[in-house]
Amino acid sequence: MSNVHPSLGNLSLKQLRAFVCVAEARSFTEAAARLSLSQSAVSQLVRELESELELKLFDRTTRTVRLTDAGEELQPTAARVLQDLGAAISGSRDLVARRRGRVRFACSPVLSSLLLPRVIGAFTARHPHITVILRDSVGSGIVDLVADGEADLALSVPPSESPFVEEEPFLTDHLALIHPRTYGWTKRRRVSWADVTTHPYIALQAQNPTRHFVDYHAALANVRLKPAYEVSFVWTAIGLVDAGLGVALIPGHTRPIVEKYENVDMRLFEQQTIVRPISLLRHRQRSLSPAAQTFADFIRAYIRL
């Protein structure tokens, strides 16, 4: 059996497809029918392939078509090339059609536990072949994931302070104050900075975006905050309030968590003046994959519902 070492420079897919079809059908006439070409066109393609390879691939008679040894060796390789190319083209079309792929999404632990599970569940039901990889992170870590290309999209409190990250206003949230119910405050009672400064204040740590937001508005109101406790996570702050150790300022969208604690009450904090924005982040210099673009479109529509 001779060895086939083709030079790929002038080979064409049409030539390979004609060769494989004739080899499978053992007939130029049948191959022409399958390819929707004339028999002379198929014969011409095979001759061109033989000329490029400098090999005879078929022994032809008036009644039969038989592969030569070189043809027998080439057939599985050519068939595999066509199959692999077909799979690649099909996969690319699936990506373009947004039927499959993956999207990496980053946001805070609170949003990761409250909002994103519902979004991902609804998205997966509609796009079962797109995988969503959720990265829960805090503060600047979320921005870094986008800037470093480790996350396609993210939700974060602006500003991102990164030249590589583009921010899109996405939704708003109100700052809320939580306090022990044992304080006995009536439902009509409005809370203000005085309630924060006259009770032990439980603050989130400095790297938390909510802490930056609280400190900024406290400075605007000429209020100096002296935390009695500083914690990393909202859940810890709520637990301390539940134990009667003070008050805390946290995002309003944490209400589903707060409602699980018997001794914690939540109320909007100066509702008319303190609104907490949340942005959808993406890399400024990188195009979104079709899967990521599909998820971005979906979450925008989901939030508007």
Image (cartoon, helix red, strand yellow):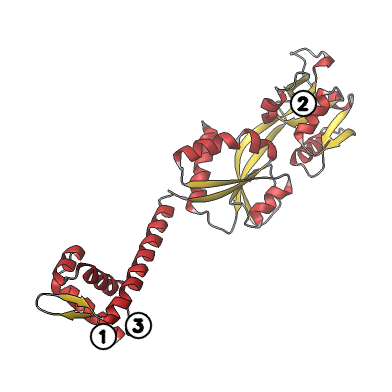
Dot 2 corresponds to which residue? 177
> Quarter-wise, where is residue 84 in the image?
bottom left
Percent x, y for residue 304?
53, 33
Q: Furthest-front residue in view?
A: 1
- For the residues labelled 1 and 3, the Cα–Cα distance comes to 13 Å
- For the residues labelled 2 and 1, the Cα–Cα distance comes to 82 Å
Dot 1 corresponds to which residue? 51
Residue in view at x 35 percent, y 84 percent: 3
Dot 3 corresponds to which residue? 4
Percent x, y for residue 89?
38, 61
In the image, 143: left or right of 299?
right
Q: Which label sits in the foreground, 3 or 2?
A: 3
Instruction: Please tell me which of labels 3 and 2 falls first in the chain.
Output: 3
Instruction: Please tell me which of labels 2 and 1 falls first in the chain.
Output: 1
- Residue type indicated by callout 1: Ser
Local secondary structure at mark 1 = helix
| Foreground residue among 12 and 6 | 6
Characterize the local packing of mark 3: few (<14), some (14-19) or many (20 or more) Cα atoms within 10 angstroms: some
Picture quarter with the N terminus: bottom left
Residue in view at x 60 percent, y 41 percent: 169
In the rendered view, tell whether residue 298 sits above or below residue 187.
below
- Residue type indicated by callout 3: Val
